[in-house]
Amino acid sequence: MKNTKRNELAVCGFAAVKKLEKNHPEKITRLYFTEEKAPLFGGLCKKLAKQHGIYNMKPAEDLERLSGTVHHQGVVAMIQAPEIIPLDSDITDSWCERGENAVLLDRIGNANNFGAIVRSAAFFGIKNIVIPNDEAQSTVTTSSYRVAEGGMEYVNIYSVNSSARLLEAMKGKMIRLGTSLDAKKQVSDIGSFEGAGARQSAFESEGKNLPFMIVLGNEESGISDIIKANCDELVIIPWAGMEKGRPCNIDSLNVAQASSIIFYEVMKCVR
């Protein structure tokens, strides 16, 4: 929940607040917790006292009002609303220089899915996430922060006006990887793609492999046609019986579940 008057964002959930305390306690301007959780935040209260921050014990009903959710888990930390950094060529060039992978979200609309993707990305060491400036795209919210279970502290989130133009600009610099139900290659084939774990001539002198830009699509319709057209490779996650021509029992995996499988396969390409 965002407090527009103060330009604050409520971060709730035990794991999310604990990771915030560990990595960026200076971001916290106010802290509220239930009597039950009070003993677990004594150290953070001391830090807040030194920086003249506010901390108070509150009943669960007040925390629900502050966070806008019943899933606050007994603690709410208020921070300045995060600014999403506009992506530019200097940033993408630095990814390529360091061989860093990135994730591009194509209109992921559900905040919980967004948070789960952030959590998986942090788990697999992918710290660059790009979202389009589109009303259909979820952004950093109280819900996504909580579901990320602390993952927000380990990723950088950038914005772009056009995902298609970004992909065009990254041609030959990153392996642009998308998912599609009509793809001919399976997710397990990722390691065999040119540039994935093999030397590319343009990078031989620097001893680097091409990093990946992983595109994850909308929950209902997947990645758009224009995005597919700008991918180097499209993959599918096989279902039970696929090899024998059996139809899938459901249309697809949840995008957050699918992201974990793809991130794992990409991680295997790291040398």
Image (cartoon, rainbow, N blue to C red):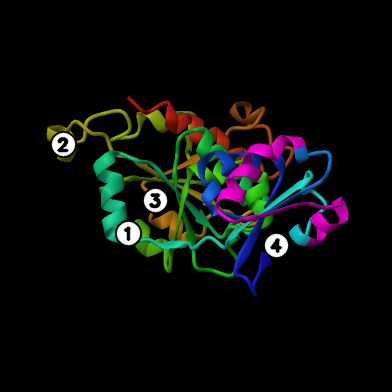
Q: Position of residue 26 (x, y in %)?
A: 52, 51
The disc label shown at residue 138, or none: none
Spatial CA distance of label 4 from label 1 is 35 Å
- Reading the image, the residue beneath label 2 is 201
**Residue that appears at 52% across and 57% down:** 106
- Eyeballing the image, is 125 above or below 4? above
State which quadrant residue 2 falls in.
Answer: bottom right
Task: Of the two numbered discs 3 and 1 on the same chain, state the one appearing first in sequence.
Answer: 1
The disc label shown at residue 168, or none: 1
As for residue 46 lying within the magenta part, the answer is yes
Q: Position of residue 68 (x, y in %)?
A: 77, 60
Report the mark closest to the observer, 4 or 1: 4
Report the mark closest to the observer, 4 or 2: 4
Nearest the viewer among 98 and 146 is 146
Task: Of the two numbered discs 4 and 3 on the same chain, state the one appearing first in sequence.
Answer: 4
Query: What is the magenta range?
Result: 39-65
Kind of residue sitting beneath label 2:
Ser
- Reading the image, the residue beneath label 4 is 1
Task: Of the two numbered discs 4 and 1 on the same chain, state the one appearing first in sequence.
Answer: 4
Task: Of the two numbered discs 1 and 2 on the same chain, state the one appearing first in sequence.
Answer: 1
